[in-house]
């Protein structure tokens, strides 16, 4: 597992969010088309029905694509979780990788989550953020070494 694979996973999650938004917009569009026809007045053209059929077909395509993306995400998340547990022995390193790449949190949010209960956190916020960067870097090195079969990792 290397940083690029983690970034790819993060991008996959972003792609899923975009597809979910597209699906919501398409559903609103379809409801808008159908509500135009709910006044009970006769229509002389089938263009509204053709438009609705096209929109429903697009919606189905989006749903199918979303299902595939969700399946890919599930597989990749399990792979990441497996490597995190297998190769990172320190809970802080595990948490940072999970929070950053699986949950998509910012560095500030991660730092706050891990260290905000400490008395000096708000006075020394930069110090704690640097600590998060260092732990993150150590975790990435361990995961990359594990990926390359380098000795000195948790599991030898």
Image: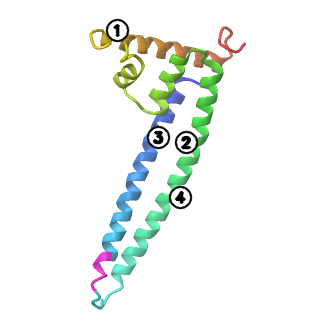
Displayed quadrant of residue 126 = top left
**Side of 50 where 44 appears, left or right:** left
Displayed quadrant of residue 145 = top right
**Side of 14 where 155 appears, left or right:** right
Magenta region, main secondary structure: loop
State how far apart marks 1 and 4 are (Cα). Answer: 46 Å
Residue nearest the observer in this picture, 126 or 26: 126
Query: Residue at image x 50%, y 17%?
Result: 92
**Side of 43 where 94 appears, left or right:** right
Callout 3: 10 Å neighbours few (<14), some, many (20+)?
many
Question: Bounds of the magenta span?
Answer: 35-39
Residue 104 is a magenta residue: no
In the picture of the structure, the residue carrying the numbered disc 4 is 64
Whether tag 3 and tag 2 are in contact, CB under 8 A, the answer is yes
Q: Earlier in the sequence, mark 1 or mark 3?
A: 3
Whether tag 4 and tag 2 are in contact, CB under 8 A, the answer is no
In the picture of the structure, the residue carrying the numbered disc 2 is 73
Select label 2 or label 1 by which is in front: 1
Query: Residue at image x 37%, y 12%?
Result: 118
């Amino acid at each position: 597992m290397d940083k690029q694979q983690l970034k790819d996973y993060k991008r996959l999650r972003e792609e899923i969010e975009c597809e979910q938004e597209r699906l919501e917009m398409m559903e609103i569009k379809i409801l808008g088309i159908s509500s135009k026809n709910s006044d009970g007045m006769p229509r002389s053209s089938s263009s509204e029905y053709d438009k609705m059929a096209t929109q429903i077909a697009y919606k189905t395509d989006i749903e199918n694509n979303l299902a595939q993306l969700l399946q890919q995400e599930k597989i990749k998340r399990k792979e990441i979780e497996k490597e995190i547990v297998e190769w990172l022995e320190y809970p802080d390193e595990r948490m940072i990788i999970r929070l950053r790449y699986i949950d998509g949190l910012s560095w500030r949010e991660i730092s706050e989550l891990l260290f905000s209960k400490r008395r000096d956190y708000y006075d020394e916020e930069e110090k704690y953020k640097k600590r998060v960067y260092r732990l993150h870097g150590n975790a990435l090195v361990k995961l990359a070494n594990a990926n390359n079969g380098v000795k000195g990792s948790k599991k030898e």
